[in-house]
C-alpha cells in the first residue's frame, strides 16, 4: 500500500446532493440523452478516459489495493474498454423496436417492444474493482440513454478522487455526476428519487438500499456477494484445475466477489489437490510471496483484522503468515474447518481457501444447497453426467465449468446473482435492457373494427369470443 485508505478524503457537502440530482432530472427531461449520437459519443469518451488516464488509474489502483498493473489492466481497464467496444458495435440494433407476433384476436396489428431509457440512475460502487464496478454499470446506463449519478466507494479513495476529477472532463457534465463520500453521503443520496439504483457491495447495505428504493418504488439491481463454492471432482485435469483455482482465488488477494470461497473435494483426492494448489501458489508468486510484485494487499486494516480472525482455531495446512503494517496476508489453505465457524458462515473476501473433504463428491450438491444461493459456482470435472447433475440440482448466479470467472469476459452472458447474492444483471445487451424500460406497443388499424368485444354482450358474442381467445 502506498497510502492508507481513508474515508476522510472522500466527502461531499450534503447540501449539494439535492440540486445535483435535480440537475440530472432536468437534463434527462430535456431529451438529448435519448439520441444514439449522444450515447455513442459518451461511450467513446468513457473509453478515451480509460486509455488517456491509464497511468494515473493504474497508480491509483496500486495505492488503493497494492495491486500490480497487469492484474489491474486485465481485470479493470481492459474490461471497460472491451465493454465500450461491444456496446458501441451493437447499440443501434439493441435500440431498435423488437417486433413480436400478434395473436389472431388482435389482428390486424403490429406488436413490438420499444426500449426506452428510465431516467436517472444511481450507481453505488464497491472498492475491490473500484473502476470497473462503476464504469461497467455506467456504460450500460449511458447506452440505454440515461443520466447517471456515481457514488464510488470511499474505501478506494484514490480511484474515487480520480473519477471525481476526470469524469467531468470527459463526459457530459449535465448528464453524469460523481459524488464522493461514505455512509452519510450515500444515505443522503438514497433520500432522493432515482429511476433505477444499481448497488455493488455486501448484503447488509444491499437491504438498506432496497428499503430506501421502496419509498419511491425505484427498481434496483443488487450486485452482492456470498460464499461461492468450488467443486473439484477427482476426474479432472489436476494441473490445470490447480492453476485456475489459484488464479481465481488469489487474484486481488482474494478480494473478488466471484472468487471461489471454498473448495469441496473427495477425502481420498484432497491431499493431491492441496499439493497441486500449494505448488501453483509458489510457481505464480515465488517462495517469498510478500516480496512478489504480483500479489495484492488487503484494502485496509479493518478488513485485514477481519480476515486474520477467520484463521483462529483452524487447521492451516499452508500459509497463514500476515503483516499488519502492510495489510499483507499470505495465500492460505485451511483443511476441514468446522461448519458453523465464521470462516464457513461468512463470505471470506480474502486469501484464505478452506478445503472441505467429503466422503464422496456427490455430497457436494447437498452441501451447496444447504446454504444461501451463491453468486457463482465452480465445477472442475471431466464427468459429463456429474456436470449435468450439478447444473440441474444447484442454483447460482453464474457457473464456471472447468475454470474460474472467465464467464465475466463474455458480454453475451449476464453478470449477476440470484437470491441473497443479488438481483438483476448487466454486461452487454443484458445491461442495456436492465437500464431500459421495455415498452409494449401494439399498433392497430382503424379499419376492420369487429364489434364483438363491445357491449351489449350477448350469448352469441360470448360463444364466439371463447373460440377466438
Ligand atoms: P463497500 O464498503 O465499498 O460498500 C459498498 C458501497 O456501499 C460503498 O459505496 C459505500 O459507501 C456504501 N455504503 C457502505 N455502508 C453504507 C450504509 N450504511 N448506507 C449506505 N451506503 C453504504 O463494499 P463492501 O460492502 O465491503 O463490498 C464487499 C461486498 O461486495 C462483498 O460481499 C462482495 O462479494 C460484494 N461485491 C459484489 C460484486 C458483484 O458484482 N456482485 C462486486 C464486488 C463486490
Image: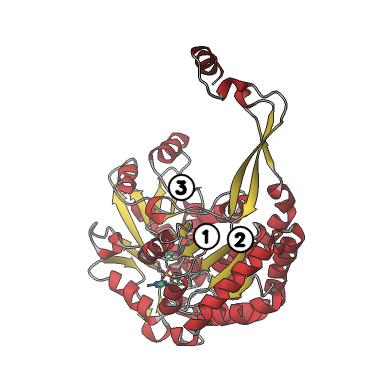
Viewer-side label of 3, 1: 1
Quadrant of res 327: bottom left
Crowding at dot 1, Cα within 10 Å, few <14 / some 14-19 / many 20+, comes out as many
Viewer-side label of 3, 2: 2
Residue 445 x/y as whole percent: 71, 31
Above/below status of 225 relative to 95? below
Q: Earlier in the sequence, mark 3 or mark 1?
A: 1
Residue 361 x/y as whole percent: 34, 43
Which residue in the protein does label 2 denote? 141
Q: Earlier in the sequence, mark 3 or mark 2?
A: 2
Q: Earlier in the sequence, mark 2 or mark 1?
A: 2
Q: CA distance from mark 3 to mark 1?
A: 37 Å
Q: CA distance from mark 3 to mark 2?
A: 35 Å
Residue 452 x/y as whole percent: 58, 20
Viewer-side label of 2, 1: 1
* Mark 2 touches mark 1? (CB < 8 Å): yes
Question: For the residue labelled by badge 1, is the local secondary structure a helix, a strand or a loop?
Answer: strand
Which residue in the protein does label 1 denote? 196
| The one of 431 and 321 positioned closer to us in this rendering | 431
Q: Is residue 41 left or right of residue 253?
A: right
Which residue in the protein does label 3 denote? 380
Quadrant of res 316: bottom left
Amino acid at each position: 500500500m502506498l497510502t492508507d485508505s481513508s474515508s476522510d478524503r472522500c466527502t461531499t457537502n450534503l447540501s449539494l446532493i439535492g440540486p445535483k440530482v435535480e440537475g440530472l432530472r432536468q437534463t434527462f427531461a430535456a431529451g438529448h440523452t435519448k439520441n444514439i449520437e449522444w450515447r455513442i459519443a459518451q461511450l467513446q469518451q468513457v473509453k478515451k478516459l480509460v486509455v488517456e488516464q491509464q497511468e494515473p488509474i493504474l497508480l491509483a489502483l496500486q495505492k488503493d489495493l497494492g495491486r500490480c498493473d497487469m492484474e489491474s489492466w486485465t481485470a479493470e481497464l481492459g474490461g471497460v474498454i472491451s465493454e465500450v467496444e461491444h456496446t458501441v458495435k451493437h447499440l443501434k440494433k439493441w435500440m431498435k423496436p423488437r417486433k413480436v407476433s400478434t395473436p389472431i384476436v388482435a389482428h390486424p396489428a403490429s406488436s413490438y417492444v420499444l426500449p426506452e431509457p428510465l431516467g436517472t440512475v444511481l450507481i453505488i460502487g464497491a472498492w475491490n474493482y473500484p473502476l470497473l464496478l462503476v464504469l461497467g454499470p455506467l456504460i450500460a446506463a449511458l447506452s440505454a440513454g440515461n443520466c447517471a449519478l456515481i457514488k464510488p466507494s470511499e474505501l478506494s479513495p484514490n480511484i474515487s478522487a480520480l473519477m471525481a476529477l476526470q469524469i467531468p472532463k470527459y463526459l457530459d457534465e449535465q448528464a453524469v455526476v460523481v459524488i464522493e463520500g461514505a455512509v452519510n453521503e450515500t444515505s443522503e443520496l438514497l433520500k432522493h428519487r432515482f429511476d433505477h439504483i444499481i448497488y455493488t457491495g455486501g448484503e447488509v447495505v444491499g437491504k438498506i438500499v432496497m428499503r430506501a428504493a421502496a419509498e419511491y418504488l425505484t427498481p434496483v439491481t443488487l450486485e452482492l456477494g456470498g460464499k461461492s463454492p468450488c467443486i473439484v471432482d477427482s476426474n479432472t485435469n489436476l494441473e490445470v484445475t490447480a492453476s485456475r483455482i489459484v488464479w481465481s482465488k488469489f487474484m486481488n488477494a482474494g478480494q473478488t466477489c466471484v472468487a471461489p470461497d471454498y473448495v469441496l473435494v473427495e477425502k481420498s483426492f484432497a491431499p493431491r489437490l492441496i499439493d497441486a494448489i500449494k505448488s501453483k501458489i509458489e510457481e505464480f508468486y515465488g517462495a517469498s510471496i510478500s516480496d512478489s510484485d504480483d500479489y495484492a494487499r488487503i484494502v485496509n486494516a479493518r478488513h485485514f483484522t477481519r480476515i486474520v480472525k477467520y484463521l483462529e482455531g483452524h487447521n492451516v495446512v499452508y500459509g497463514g503468515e500476515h503483516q499488519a503494517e502492510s495489510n499483507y496476508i499470505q495465500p492460505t489453505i485451511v483443511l476441514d474447518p468446522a461448519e458453523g465457524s465464521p470462516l464457513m458462515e461468512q463470505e471470506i473476501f480474502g486469501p484464505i481457501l478452506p478445503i472441505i473433504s467429503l466422503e464422496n463428491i456427490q455430497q457436494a450438491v447437498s452441501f451447496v444447497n444447504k446454504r444461501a444461493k451463491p453468486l457463482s459456482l465452480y465445477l472442475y470435472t471431466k464427468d459429463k453426467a456429474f456436470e449435468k447433475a450439478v447444473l440441474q440440482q444447484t442454483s447460482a448466479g453464474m457457473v464456471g465449468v472447468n475454470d474460474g470467472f472467465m464467464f465475466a469476459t463474455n458480454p453475451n452472458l449476464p453478470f449477476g446473482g440470484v437470491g441473497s447474492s443479488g438481483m438483476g444483471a448487466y454486461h452487454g445487451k443484458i445491461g442495456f435492457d436492465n437500464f431500459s424500460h421495455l415498452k409494449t406497443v401494439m399498433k392497430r388499424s382503424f379499419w376492420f373494427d369487429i364489434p364483438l368485444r363491445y357491449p351489449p354482450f350477448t350469448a352469441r358474442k360470448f360463444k364466439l369470443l371463447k373460440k377466438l381467445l
